[in-house]
């Protein structure tokens, strides 16, 4: 399970690219939230890194660490 806060752009892209994720998307306090299961960090991590300024990773800590590590790796190139 992961939890993400999404901008409207990230929300619309998630709905388009991952239609099965729609049941895990909701609106909270004028913010879009994805809270649902993922099978691995790879696919969703690629999505988050591609929209890094549009998405806040809330939980779990393991996924926050994964995104931070991948982001650092990308900066080395």
Image (spheres, rainbow, N blue to C red):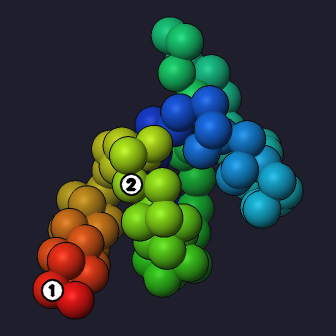
Side of 43 where 62 appears, left or right: left
Q: Can you see residue 66?
A: yes
Side of 29 where 67 appears, left or right: left
User: Badge 1: how crowded within 10 Å, few (<14), some, or many (20+)?
Assistant: few
Would you say the residues marked 1 and 2 are in contact, meaning their CB atoms lie under 8 Å apart?
Answer: no
In terms of image quadrants, where is residue 39? bottom right
User: Badge 2: how crowded within 10 Å, few (<14), some, or many (20+)?
Assistant: some
Q: Nearer the viewer, mark 1 or mark 2?
A: 1
Question: How many numbered marks are there?
Answer: 2
Q: Can you see residue 69?
A: no
Please tell me whether mark 1 sits on a helix, a strand or a loop. Answer: loop
Query: Which residue lies under the disc numbered 2?
Result: 52
Residue 19 in picture, x, y percent from top left: 84, 56
Which disc, if any, is residue 4? none
Please tell me whether mark 2 sits on a helix, a strand or a loop. Answer: loop
Residue 14 in picture, x, y percent from top left: 69, 52
Residue 36 in picture, x, y percent from top left: 58, 53
Residue displayed at 54% across by 66% down: 47
Residue displayed at 25% across by 72% down: 71
Residue 44 in picture, x, y percent from top left: 53, 69
Q: Quadrant of the C terminus?
A: bottom left
Q: Is residue 33 above or below residue 69?
A: above
Q: Looking at the image, is mark 1 or mark 2 earlier in the sequence? A: 2
Q: CA distance from mark 1 to mark 2?
A: 16 Å
Residue displayed at 19% across by 77% down: 75
Which disc, if any, is residue 76? 1
Q: Is residue 42 above or below residue 56?
A: below
Q: Is residue 34 above or below residue 69?
A: above
């Amino acid at each position: 399970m992961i939890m993400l806060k999404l901008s409207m752009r990230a929300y619309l892209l998630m709905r388009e690219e991952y239609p099965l994720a729609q049941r895990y998307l909701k609106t909270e306090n004028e913010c879009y939230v994805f809270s649902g299961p993922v099978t691995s960090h790879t696919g969703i991590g690629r999505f988050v890194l591609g929209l890094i300024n549009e998405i806040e990773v809330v939980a779990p800590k393991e996924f926050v660490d994964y995104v931070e590590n991948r982001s650092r790796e990308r900066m080395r190139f």
